[in-house]
Amino acid sequence: MSVGLMPAANPPTFDPLECASRSHEVQRLAWRIKTCVDQADAVLAALRRIQLNDWQSPAGRAYRTTIALHASALMRARESMDAAVALVLRHSQNVSVSSERGQ
């Protein structure tokens, strides 16, 4: 089965119940992303604790540097996910508004 664009002659119909369900599903997606943000926060806290260890050996310092690089990358990913939560929630509101307009 191929997925294509709907012809202009057949615009989609808006079913309020279907749109409400979509809005709810989009909100659930935002919640799942927020859960990932919370998990990233927990990992970042653990990485910070590791970085506080005072390793004097060259291997220990290299390990701490590697941890810092990974923590930095994870922080950027966490910030992106946090921004995604706001965007997905905004989209869920737009889905609700479009269902009201379609009535």
Image (tube, rainbow, N blue to C red):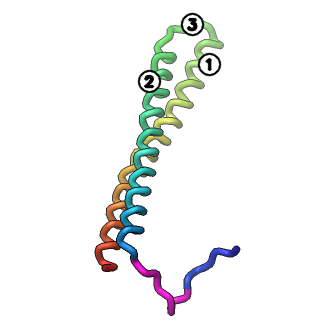
Neighbor class of circle 1 (other Cα within 10 Å; few <14, some 14-19, many 20+) is few
- Can you give x and y, in whole percent of width and height, for residue 57 in the image? 62, 8
| Observer-nearest of 87 and 61 | 87
Instruction: Name the residue that disc number 3 marks.
Output: 56
Instruction: Point out the tag, 2 or 3, that comes first from the N-terminus.
Output: 2
> Vertical placement of 6 versus 97: above or below?
below
Q: Which residues are magenta?
A: 7-14
Is residue 50 within the magenta segment?
Answer: no
Amino acid type for the residue under numbered disc 2 = Ala
- Can you give x and y, in whole percent of width and height, for residue 34 in the image? 41, 42
Is residue 10 within the magenta segment?
Answer: yes
Of marks 2 and 3, the one in the foreground: 2
Instruction: Name the residue that disc number 2 marks.
Output: 45
Instruction: Point out the tag, 2 or 1, that comes first from the N-terminus.
Output: 2
Disc number placed over residue 89 in the picture, else none: none
Q: Quadrant of the C terminus?
A: bottom left
Disc number placed over residue 62 in the picture, else none: 1
SS of the residue under disc 3: loop
SS of the residue under disc 2: helix
Q: Quadrant of the N terminus?
A: bottom right
Amino acid type for the residue under numbered disc 3 = Gln
| Observer-nearest of 66 and 91 | 91
What residue sits 55% from the left and 83% below the top?
Answer: 6
55 sits left or right of 100 in the view: right
**Label 1 to label 3: alpha-carbon separation:** 10 Å
What residue sits 51% from the left and 36% below the top?
Answer: 74
Neighbor class of circle 3 (other Cα within 10 Å; few <14, some 14-19, many 20+) is few
